Amino acid sequence: MSDIISVENLVHIYGAGTPFERRALDNINFTVRKGEILGLIGHTGSGKSTLIQHLNGLLKPHDGHIFFEGKDIWNGGDIRATRFKIGLVFQYPEYQLFEETVYKDVAFGPKNMGLSEDEADERVREAVYFVGIGEELLEKSPFELSGGQKRRVAIAGVLAMRPEVLILDEPTAGLDPLGRQEILARIEEFHRERGTTVVLVTHNMEEIARYADRIVVMDDATIRFEGAPSEIFSHASELSEIGLDVPMITKVFLRLHELGLEVDTSVYTLESAISQLIALRERGRGNA
């Protein structure tokens, strides 16, 4: 799997040269692989939001480089084109809705790309389908919708630009469990059908465990861990030390291990937990 985004020696400083100077990113190096779902986790203030705003050029590095499809976005790259190709959905994106109808809000991005009315219309209808917004709502004001519907409309506005990379900053924040599940299922469907690369920022370890192919853990402006979910969640004690949690099923298996059972403590999905418990039961029968 090739890299679609590469970050090299990235440094960002807030308040540079003032008494309030703070290094928000300190020599960050990592890649985003084409077609994957990358989970990005870290405690509040670890640098996650600052990092993702560099990936499509909303923030400029004080030092280091960001490469998109092999080109440095600040040295010979086209920043405007990059921002269309790398779509960023901020936390609570519904606060960014502004048009008088749902249709106009979703169509705003495609029209800014210079697409024709027909092309923009096709993009709008495809995007609202993916997020589960019925076409009967297209002529309604987005401000008349429920909180969950507003969130979907805001996400649809980014999907309508058909980004090659979709970055979501806490997309389920503030939603009830059903709303969180529905939003993530829609994003996963979009990822699967269009092959879009996804970067998912969240505090919810169950969400990361279920959807991420690979995880990057940030701590104090640096990257602490990077790897497959099983590898990341094997560092349960270290994650707790930096203010992060592990999936509930992992906690259960850590406790089983403490009680003397021979189980894999890096388990992080219900399916693998069930398989382990079945195997444990069969071993018990064999020893009986």
Image (cartoon, rainbow, N blue to C red):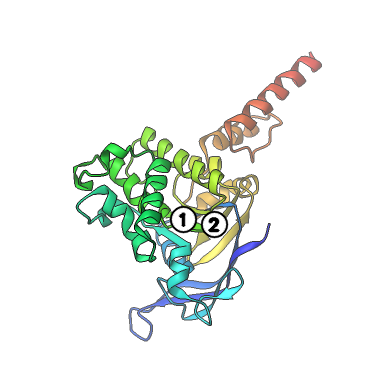
CB contact under 8 Å: marks 1 and 2: no
The reply, left or right, for residue 169 in relation to residue 199 is: left
Task: Specify the amino acid type for callout 1.
Answer: Arg
**Amino acid type, callout 2:** Val
Q: Which mark is residue 217?
A: 2
Q: Position of residue 261 (x, y in %)?
A: 68, 29
Vertical relation: 213 (above or below) 224: above
Disc ID at residue 162:
1
Quadrant in the rendering for residue 275 = top right
Q: Is residue 275 left or right of residue 219?
A: right
Q: Is residue 170 visible?
A: no
- Residue closer to the observer: 112 or 71: 112
Q: Earlier in the sequence, mark 1 or mark 2?
A: 1
Q: Residue furthest bottom?
A: 17
Residue nearest the observer in this picture, 161 or 34: 161
Tell me the CA gap for discs 1 and 2.
27 Å
